[in-house]
Amino acid sequence: MDRETLSLSRLKWGHWTILVVALVMSVVGLWQSVLPYLAERHYRDGFNFDAATRYKYAVEELEIAVQYAPWETQYIMALAKAIEGLADQTPDVPTKIQLLQRAESLYLRTIDLDVMNPWQHNRLGAVYTLMADLIPARRVELTAMAEREVRSAAEYDHQNPLFQLNLAYYLHRAGRFEEARKYYQIVLDMDPNILEAHYNMADISRREGKIGDTLKSYLAVYTVNKDFPNINLALAGTYAQMGRTADAIPYMEAEIKKRPDFVDGIKSLITMYQQTGNFARIAELYYQLIMLNPGSKDYYPAFAAAVKTAGKSDATLASLNQLKAQNPNAQVLDELIALVR
């Protein structure tokens, strides 16, 4: 029997239906295979814009990534975080609130997809905290919602010190010091080198008048990291409060060395040296203040008095004359020379 040749004209409706369905499924399958690549490309671009704090472009790219892969919580969270960044850059309060509400809806969407992921609860808690400051009429409600989310993050990953620290910090800000201390201690039990916990424990002890515990916690920070923000000021202030001026001075000196234009710090250091009677150093500090504001004569008398009390008139005159030779047009030096002479 002759083999019949298949032709399109002889296909039945059922065959056509199968052929069309197969073709559509092939196209859909091909498109679905391309979607993850497109989503990842836009996610990477959005991630790079976010890292460069170019949040407007980050949001645009990440929105496309989420459209291509709406099931990816990583992309949704990145988009919400970029929207938070855009809100931070926005001065207009109503617009800022709208952006934060949009971030809120995205974080809630990720929680629906994965309720036990602590990162989403943690970020949502931060959003509610920001909104509470911007919407006074809802402050109580939003503050409670923020605590709920921060506490959820700490509970869902109770072995992660980051979430315990964040809950402790939240309670600390709320003035619930005993609860905050409990969670700071949990953090330190997990990792004693988390310096923020030591530093914040010191603040609680200071507020409670426990000056010895305050000093102990600050020293724990300083021992590990001498460059921890404000640690020199914290130690100088604590020692000064204890009446241990000689111990406070080195820390304030270290801070002034790092920030030679720190006027309040220089003034505090002058007060400390007045208690120890180091008028030579006081004269140097007054000169530093004069140089920071050469148009003012407020510190001239104090400078001259410190020089004379220290018995450094001749040495100071020699130094000022040397500076005058290098800066012949400096009128301030003429005036200081006249005062010291």
Image (cartoon, grey):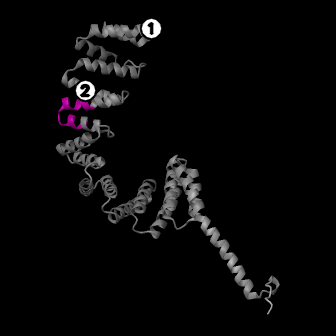
The foreground one among 253 and 336 is: 253
Residue on which the image places disc 2 = 271
Percent x, y of residue 47 = 52, 53
On-image quarter of the N terminus = bottom right
Q: Quadrant of the C terminus?
A: top left
> Looking at the image, which is closer to me, 176 or 318?
318
- Secondary structure at badge 2 equals helix
Does the rendering let one see residue 113? Answer: yes
Q: CA distance from mark 2 to mark 1?
A: 33 Å
Q: Which stretch did the figure color magenta?
A: 237-251
Q: Between residues 23 and 107, which one lies in front from this camera angle? A: 23
The secondary structure that dominates the magenta segment is helix
From the viewer's perspective, tell me whether residue 51 is left or right of residue 304. right
- Between disc 2 and disc 1, whose residue precedes? 2
Q: Residues within 10 Å of mark 2 (few under 14, many from 20)?
A: some
Residue 136 point in image, percent of width and height: 43, 56
Q: Is residue 28 above or below residue 162?
A: below
On the picture, is 271 further left or further right than 116?
left
> Given the image, on which type of amino acid does mark 2 rest?
Thr
Residue position for label 1: 328
Element at label 1 = loop
Name the spot of residue 181 as percent of width and height, x first. Answer: 24, 54
104 within the magenta span: no
